[in-house]
Image (cartoon, rainbow, N blue to C red):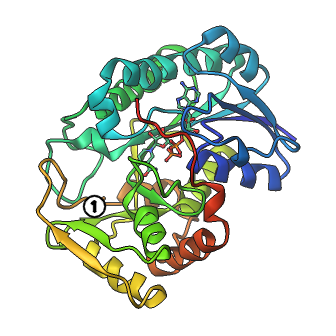
Amino acid sequence: MAKVAVTGGAGFIGSNLTRRLISEGYDVVVVDDLSTGLISNVDQERSKFHQVSITDPEALNNALKGCGTIFHLAARGSVPRSIKNPVATHDVNATGTLNVLEAARANGAHVIFSSSSSVYGRNMQLPKDESMWLGPMTPYAASKLAGEGYVQAYSAAYGVPTTLLRFFNVFGPRQRPDHEYAAVLPKWIWLAMQGQAIDIYGDGTASRDFTYVDTVLDIAITAMKEKVLTEGAMNLAYGNRIFLNETIEMLKKHFPDLQVNYKPERLGDVKESQNDPVLLKKLFPSVQPKPFEVALSETVDWLKEFGQSVANGPATVD
Ligand SMILES: NC(=O)c1ccc[n+]([C@@H]2O[C@H](COP(=O)([O-])OP(=O)(O)OC[C@H]3O[C@@H](n4cnc5c(N)ncnc54)[C@H](O)[C@@H]3O)[C@@H](O)[C@H]2O)c1
Protein backbone atom coordinates (compact mmCIF):
# COMPACT_ATOMS: atom_id res chain seq x y z
CA MET A 1 0.00 0.00 0.00
CA ALA A 2 1.11 3.58 -0.60
CA LYS A 3 3.38 5.30 1.89
CA VAL A 4 1.85 8.44 3.40
CA ALA A 5 3.00 10.82 6.13
CA VAL A 6 1.18 12.64 8.91
CA THR A 7 3.04 15.53 10.53
CA GLY A 8 1.59 16.26 13.94
CA GLY A 9 0.49 12.63 14.12
CA ALA A 10 0.72 12.52 17.94
CA GLY A 11 -1.77 15.37 18.23
CA PHE A 12 -5.55 15.41 18.25
CA ILE A 13 -6.47 15.40 14.54
CA GLY A 14 -3.24 13.74 13.41
CA SER A 15 -3.64 10.73 15.71
CA ASN A 16 -7.22 10.15 14.57
CA LEU A 17 -6.07 10.43 10.95
CA THR A 18 -3.16 8.05 11.50
CA ARG A 19 -5.47 5.42 13.00
CA ARG A 20 -7.89 5.68 10.09
CA LEU A 21 -5.08 5.43 7.52
CA ILE A 22 -3.59 2.38 9.25
CA SER A 23 -7.01 0.72 9.36
CA GLU A 24 -7.33 1.29 5.60
CA GLY A 25 -3.98 -0.45 5.04
CA TYR A 26 -1.69 2.52 4.33
CA ASP A 27 1.98 2.47 5.25
CA VAL A 28 2.01 5.46 7.63
CA VAL A 29 4.96 7.62 8.68
CA VAL A 30 4.32 9.85 11.72
CA VAL A 31 6.41 12.96 12.31
CA ASP A 32 5.95 14.78 15.62
CA ASP A 33 8.25 16.48 18.11
CA LEU A 34 5.87 15.62 20.99
CA SER A 35 5.79 19.28 22.10
CA THR A 36 2.05 19.02 22.74
CA GLY A 37 1.29 15.63 21.20
CA LEU A 38 1.32 12.41 23.20
CA ILE A 39 3.43 9.36 22.52
CA SER A 40 0.49 7.26 23.74
CA ASN A 41 -1.45 8.59 20.72
CA VAL A 42 1.03 6.98 18.33
CA ASP A 43 0.59 3.36 17.28
CA GLN A 44 4.29 2.56 17.10
CA GLU A 45 3.69 -1.04 16.12
CA ARG A 46 1.69 -0.24 13.02
CA SER A 47 3.29 3.05 11.92
CA LYS A 48 6.83 4.39 11.62
CA PHE A 49 7.34 7.14 14.21
CA HIS A 50 9.96 9.88 13.89
CA GLN A 51 10.37 12.22 16.84
CA VAL A 52 11.47 15.08 14.65
CA SER A 53 10.72 18.79 14.50
CA ILE A 54 9.51 20.18 11.21
CA THR A 55 11.96 23.03 11.86
CA ASP A 56 14.83 20.57 11.21
CA PRO A 57 14.89 20.22 7.40
CA GLU A 58 17.44 17.43 7.25
CA ALA A 59 15.71 15.15 9.74
CA LEU A 60 12.36 15.99 8.15
CA ASN A 61 13.59 15.08 4.65
CA ASN A 62 14.86 11.76 5.91
CA ALA A 63 11.57 10.99 7.63
CA LEU A 64 9.43 11.92 4.62
CA LYS A 65 11.47 10.07 2.00
CA GLY A 66 9.27 8.04 -0.36
CA CYS A 67 5.94 9.43 0.91
CA GLY A 68 3.42 10.12 -1.86
CA THR A 69 1.06 12.15 0.33
CA ILE A 70 1.90 14.38 3.28
CA PHE A 71 -0.91 15.40 5.60
CA HIS A 72 0.66 18.44 7.21
CA LEU A 73 -0.94 18.98 10.62
CA ALA A 74 2.03 19.77 12.85
CA ALA A 75 1.74 23.26 14.29
CA ARG A 76 2.16 25.35 17.37
CA GLY A 77 -1.52 25.74 18.01
CA SER A 78 -3.33 28.17 20.27
CA VAL A 79 -3.75 31.88 19.78
CA PRO A 80 -2.68 32.97 23.31
CA ARG A 81 0.46 30.88 23.01
CA SER A 82 1.35 32.71 19.79
CA ILE A 83 0.81 36.08 21.43
CA LYS A 84 3.27 35.09 24.15
CA ASN A 85 5.86 33.84 21.67
CA PRO A 86 5.27 34.96 18.07
CA VAL A 87 8.70 34.01 16.76
CA ALA A 88 8.41 30.40 17.91
CA THR A 89 4.97 30.23 16.29
CA HIS A 90 6.38 31.58 13.03
CA ASP A 91 9.31 29.14 13.09
CA VAL A 92 7.01 26.12 13.31
CA ASN A 93 3.92 27.20 11.40
CA ALA A 94 5.50 29.23 8.59
CA THR A 95 9.12 28.06 8.23
CA GLY A 96 8.16 24.51 9.23
CA THR A 97 5.52 24.47 6.49
CA LEU A 98 8.12 25.69 4.01
CA ASN A 99 10.34 22.78 5.06
CA VAL A 100 7.48 20.32 4.55
CA LEU A 101 6.86 21.77 1.07
CA GLU A 102 10.53 21.39 0.18
CA ALA A 103 10.38 17.73 1.20
CA ALA A 104 7.20 17.33 -0.88
CA ARG A 105 8.88 18.91 -3.88
CA ALA A 106 11.78 16.46 -3.58
CA ASN A 107 9.41 13.49 -3.33
CA GLY A 108 6.73 14.62 -5.81
CA ALA A 109 4.27 14.35 -2.92
CA HIS A 110 0.73 15.72 -2.59
CA VAL A 111 0.48 18.08 0.41
CA ILE A 112 -2.76 18.40 2.35
CA PHE A 113 -2.37 21.44 4.57
CA SER A 114 -4.35 22.41 7.67
CA SER A 115 -4.93 26.12 7.89
CA SER A 116 -7.37 27.88 10.17
CA SER A 117 -10.45 30.10 9.96
CA SER A 118 -8.53 32.52 12.19
CA VAL A 119 -6.99 33.97 9.00
CA TYR A 120 -10.25 35.93 8.56
CA GLY A 121 -9.53 37.79 11.83
CA ARG A 122 -10.81 41.35 11.53
CA ASN A 123 -13.24 40.42 8.79
CA MET A 124 -16.45 39.96 10.78
CA GLN A 125 -18.73 39.34 7.80
CA LEU A 126 -20.77 36.12 8.03
CA PRO A 127 -21.02 33.52 6.72
CA LYS A 128 -17.45 33.21 5.55
CA ASP A 129 -16.51 32.26 2.03
CA GLU A 130 -13.17 31.85 0.32
CA SER A 131 -13.44 35.06 -1.71
CA MET A 132 -13.47 37.33 1.34
CA TRP A 133 -10.55 39.50 2.46
CA LEU A 134 -8.35 38.20 5.23
CA GLY A 135 -7.15 40.16 8.26
CA PRO A 136 -5.12 38.07 10.71
CA MET A 137 -5.20 39.53 14.21
CA THR A 138 -2.73 37.24 15.96
CA PRO A 139 0.70 35.77 15.23
CA TYR A 140 -0.95 32.33 15.05
CA ALA A 141 -3.32 33.49 12.29
CA ALA A 142 -0.50 35.30 10.47
CA SER A 143 1.67 32.17 10.59
CA LYS A 144 -1.15 30.07 9.15
CA LEU A 145 -1.67 32.62 6.39
CA ALA A 146 2.06 32.54 5.64
CA GLY A 147 1.75 28.75 5.38
CA GLU A 148 -1.19 29.19 2.99
CA GLY A 149 0.93 31.54 0.88
CA TYR A 150 3.77 29.04 0.62
CA VAL A 151 1.40 26.18 -0.19
CA GLN A 152 -0.06 28.17 -3.09
CA ALA A 153 3.37 29.33 -4.26
CA TYR A 154 4.74 25.78 -4.32
CA SER A 155 1.75 24.68 -6.33
CA ALA A 156 2.16 27.51 -8.86
CA ALA A 157 5.96 27.65 -9.07
CA TYR A 158 6.87 23.96 -8.77
CA GLY A 159 3.67 22.11 -9.59
CA VAL A 160 3.44 20.52 -6.12
CA PRO A 161 -0.10 19.11 -5.85
CA THR A 162 -1.78 20.81 -2.88
CA THR A 163 -5.06 20.79 -1.00
CA LEU A 164 -5.44 23.75 1.33
CA LEU A 165 -8.05 23.25 4.04
CA ARG A 166 -9.11 25.87 6.56
CA PHE A 167 -10.42 24.17 9.69
CA PHE A 168 -12.94 25.90 11.92
CA ASN A 169 -13.59 24.45 15.43
CA VAL A 170 -12.75 20.77 15.19
CA PHE A 171 -13.71 18.48 18.09
CA GLY A 172 -13.89 14.80 18.94
CA PRO A 173 -12.06 11.90 20.56
CA ARG A 174 -8.38 12.38 21.51
CA GLN A 175 -8.64 16.15 21.86
CA ARG A 176 -6.84 17.11 25.05
CA PRO A 177 -9.34 18.35 27.64
CA ASP A 178 -7.23 19.48 30.54
CA HIS A 179 -4.50 21.96 29.68
CA GLU A 180 -4.31 25.73 29.81
CA TYR A 181 -5.24 26.15 26.14
CA ALA A 182 -7.78 23.33 25.83
CA ALA A 183 -10.66 23.86 23.39
CA VAL A 184 -14.08 24.60 24.81
CA LEU A 185 -15.94 21.31 24.18
CA PRO A 186 -13.43 18.82 25.65
CA LYS A 187 -12.75 21.24 28.50
CA TRP A 188 -16.46 21.50 29.40
CA ILE A 189 -17.03 17.75 29.13
CA TRP A 190 -13.97 17.06 31.29
CA LEU A 191 -15.10 19.50 34.01
CA ALA A 192 -18.63 18.09 33.87
CA MET A 193 -17.20 14.59 34.33
CA GLN A 194 -15.47 15.75 37.55
CA GLY A 195 -18.72 17.36 38.76
CA GLN A 196 -17.21 20.85 38.39
CA ALA A 197 -18.97 23.97 37.13
CA ILE A 198 -18.14 25.31 33.68
CA ASP A 199 -17.52 28.95 32.77
CA ILE A 200 -19.14 30.71 29.83
CA TYR A 201 -17.82 34.12 28.84
CA GLY A 202 -20.79 36.22 27.74
CA ASP A 203 -24.45 35.26 27.77
CA GLY A 204 -24.08 32.02 25.81
CA THR A 205 -25.44 33.42 22.56
CA ALA A 206 -22.03 33.15 20.89
CA SER A 207 -22.02 30.47 18.19
CA ARG A 208 -19.49 28.24 16.46
CA ASP A 209 -19.40 26.17 13.29
CA PHE A 210 -18.16 23.02 15.04
CA THR A 211 -16.80 20.23 12.82
CA TYR A 212 -16.47 16.64 14.01
CA VAL A 213 -13.01 15.18 13.59
CA ASP A 214 -14.36 12.18 11.62
CA THR A 215 -15.70 14.60 9.02
CA VAL A 216 -12.30 16.26 8.76
CA LEU A 217 -10.75 12.82 8.18
CA ASP A 218 -13.36 12.01 5.52
CA ILE A 219 -12.40 15.17 3.65
CA ALA A 220 -8.64 14.77 4.04
CA ILE A 221 -8.66 11.12 2.96
CA THR A 222 -10.99 11.81 0.02
CA ALA A 223 -8.62 14.62 -1.02
CA MET A 224 -5.80 12.07 -1.08
CA LYS A 225 -7.66 9.23 -2.81
CA GLU A 226 -9.38 11.35 -5.44
CA LYS A 227 -6.55 13.88 -5.65
CA VAL A 228 -8.90 16.78 -4.97
CA LEU A 229 -6.68 19.86 -5.32
CA THR A 230 -7.70 23.38 -4.35
CA GLU A 231 -6.87 26.45 -6.39
CA GLY A 232 -6.75 28.66 -3.33
CA ALA A 233 -8.04 27.70 0.11
CA MET A 234 -11.17 25.74 0.98
CA ASN A 235 -13.07 26.31 4.22
CA LEU A 236 -13.83 23.07 6.01
CA ALA A 237 -17.05 23.61 7.99
CA TYR A 238 -20.64 22.86 7.09
CA GLY A 239 -22.35 26.14 7.95
CA ASN A 240 -23.59 25.17 11.41
CA ARG A 241 -24.55 27.92 13.81
CA ILE A 242 -24.31 26.12 17.13
CA PHE A 243 -24.95 28.39 20.10
CA LEU A 244 -23.02 27.75 23.29
CA ASN A 245 -26.28 27.72 25.31
CA GLU A 246 -27.62 25.04 22.94
CA THR A 247 -24.48 22.97 23.51
CA ILE A 248 -24.99 23.23 27.26
CA GLU A 249 -28.55 21.92 26.96
CA MET A 250 -27.18 18.95 25.01
CA LEU A 251 -24.50 18.34 27.65
CA LYS A 252 -27.14 18.43 30.40
CA LYS A 253 -28.64 15.27 28.88
CA HIS A 254 -25.35 13.56 29.81
CA PHE A 255 -24.69 15.55 33.00
CA PRO A 256 -28.06 16.59 34.49
CA ASP A 257 -26.42 18.42 37.45
CA LEU A 258 -24.16 20.55 35.25
CA GLN A 259 -23.55 23.99 36.81
CA VAL A 260 -22.81 26.95 34.54
CA ASN A 261 -21.15 30.24 35.59
CA TYR A 262 -21.84 33.12 33.23
CA LYS A 263 -18.83 35.47 33.24
CA PRO A 264 -18.22 38.82 31.50
CA GLU A 265 -17.30 38.58 27.82
CA ARG A 266 -13.56 38.40 27.17
CA LEU A 267 -11.93 41.03 25.01
CA GLY A 268 -11.11 39.65 21.57
CA ASP A 269 -13.45 36.64 21.73
CA VAL A 270 -15.21 36.15 18.40
CA LYS A 271 -18.98 36.21 18.87
CA GLU A 272 -19.93 34.13 15.86
CA SER A 273 -18.13 31.95 13.38
CA GLN A 274 -19.87 30.31 10.46
CA ASN A 275 -18.85 29.09 7.03
CA ASP A 276 -20.77 29.10 3.77
CA PRO A 277 -19.96 25.57 2.56
CA VAL A 278 -20.58 26.04 -1.19
CA LEU A 279 -17.03 25.18 -2.29
CA LEU A 280 -16.77 22.35 0.26
CA LYS A 281 -19.92 20.68 -1.07
CA LYS A 282 -18.81 21.21 -4.66
CA LEU A 283 -15.35 19.66 -4.17
CA PHE A 284 -16.44 16.89 -1.77
CA PRO A 285 -20.03 16.00 -2.72
CA SER A 286 -19.77 12.47 -1.30
CA VAL A 287 -18.88 13.47 2.27
CA GLN A 288 -21.80 13.67 4.71
CA PRO A 289 -21.03 15.33 8.07
CA LYS A 290 -22.24 13.65 11.24
CA PRO A 291 -24.97 15.66 13.03
CA PHE A 292 -23.54 17.77 15.87
CA GLU A 293 -25.50 16.22 18.72
CA VAL A 294 -24.55 12.67 17.68
CA ALA A 295 -20.90 13.68 17.38
CA LEU A 296 -21.03 15.42 20.77
CA SER A 297 -22.44 12.25 22.38
CA GLU A 298 -19.68 10.15 20.84
CA THR A 299 -17.11 12.60 22.21
CA VAL A 300 -18.65 12.45 25.72
CA ASP A 301 -18.64 8.64 25.59
CA TRP A 302 -15.02 8.57 24.43
CA LEU A 303 -13.84 10.97 27.13
CA LYS A 304 -15.69 9.00 29.81
CA GLU A 305 -14.00 5.79 28.74
CA PHE A 306 -10.57 6.91 27.57
CA GLY A 307 -10.18 10.58 28.61
CA GLN A 308 -7.45 9.80 31.10
CA SER A 309 -5.22 8.69 28.23
CA VAL A 310 -5.10 12.22 26.79
CA ALA A 311 -5.15 14.13 30.09
CA ASN A 312 -1.98 15.13 31.95
CA GLY A 313 0.17 15.55 28.84
CA PRO A 314 2.82 18.26 28.30
CA ALA A 315 1.74 21.47 30.00
CA THR A 316 2.45 23.81 27.03
CA VAL A 317 3.29 26.66 29.39
CA ASP A 318 5.97 28.28 27.19
N1 LIG B 1 -8.37 21.66 16.31
C1 LIG B 1 -8.89 22.70 15.67
O1 LIG B 1 -10.03 23.10 15.93
C2 LIG B 1 -8.12 23.40 14.57
C3 LIG B 1 -8.67 24.56 13.99
C4 LIG B 1 -7.95 25.21 13.00
C5 LIG B 1 -6.74 24.69 12.55
N2 LIG B 1 -6.23 23.58 13.14
C6 LIG B 1 -4.93 23.09 12.67
O2 LIG B 1 -5.00 21.68 12.49
C7 LIG B 1 -3.74 21.09 12.81
C8 LIG B 1 -3.93 19.98 13.84
O3 LIG B 1 -4.55 20.54 14.99
P1 LIG B 1 -4.77 19.72 16.33
O4 LIG B 1 -5.97 20.30 16.97
O5 LIG B 1 -4.69 18.28 16.07
O6 LIG B 1 -3.50 20.20 17.17
P2 LIG B 1 -2.57 19.43 18.19
O7 LIG B 1 -1.87 20.50 18.97
O8 LIG B 1 -3.33 18.40 18.95
O9 LIG B 1 -1.54 18.70 17.24
C9 LIG B 1 -0.43 19.34 16.69
C10 LIG B 1 0.73 18.38 16.77
O10 LIG B 1 1.88 19.01 16.17
C11 LIG B 1 3.00 18.67 16.95
N3 LIG B 1 4.03 19.69 16.75
C12 LIG B 1 4.06 20.95 17.22
N4 LIG B 1 5.19 21.55 16.83
C13 LIG B 1 5.88 20.65 16.07
C14 LIG B 1 7.14 20.69 15.40
N5 LIG B 1 7.92 21.76 15.43
N6 LIG B 1 7.53 19.58 14.73
C15 LIG B 1 6.76 18.45 14.69
N7 LIG B 1 5.58 18.36 15.33
C16 LIG B 1 5.15 19.46 16.01
C17 LIG B 1 2.51 18.63 18.38
O11 LIG B 1 3.35 17.87 19.25
C18 LIG B 1 1.14 18.00 18.20
O12 LIG B 1 1.20 16.60 18.32
C19 LIG B 1 -2.84 22.22 13.27
O13 LIG B 1 -2.07 22.64 12.16
C20 LIG B 1 -3.80 23.32 13.65
O14 LIG B 1 -3.23 24.60 13.51
C21 LIG B 1 -6.88 22.92 14.15
Which quadrant of the structure image shows residue 110?
A: top right
Q: Residue at x 54, y 16 (%)?
A: 55
Disc 1, ligand 1: is the CB inside 8 Å? Answer: no
Residue 188, percent across and down?
Answer: 40, 68
Residue 142, can we see it? no
Residue 100, can we see it? yes
| Left or right placement of residue 42 versus residue 260 in this view | right
| Left or right placement of residue 51 versus residue 232 in this view | right
Which quadrant of the structure image shows residue 93?
A: top left
Residue 293, percent across and down?
Answer: 46, 80
Q: Nearer the viewer, residue 247 or 136?
A: 247
Q: Quadrant of the N terminus?
A: top right
- Outermost residue on the front side: it is 195
- Outermost residue on the top side: it is 58
Q: Nearer the viewer, residue 25 or 10?
A: 10
Q: Residue at x 61, y 11 (%)?
A: 57
Does 243 sit above or below residue 94? below
Does 285 sit above or below residue 164? below
Q: Mark 1: which secondary structure? A: loop
| Left or right placement of residue 75 versus residue 259 in this view | right
Q: Nearer the viewer, residue 95 or 221?
A: 95
Q: Quadrant of the C terminus?
A: top left
Residue 227, percent across and down?
Answer: 63, 42
Q: How many marks?
A: 1
Residue 74, percent across and down?
Answer: 55, 33
| Left or right placement of residue 266 versus residue 235 in this view | left
Q: Amino acid at mark 1?
A: Gln
Q: Residue at x 66, y 17 (%)?
A: 60
The residue wearing badge 1 is: 274
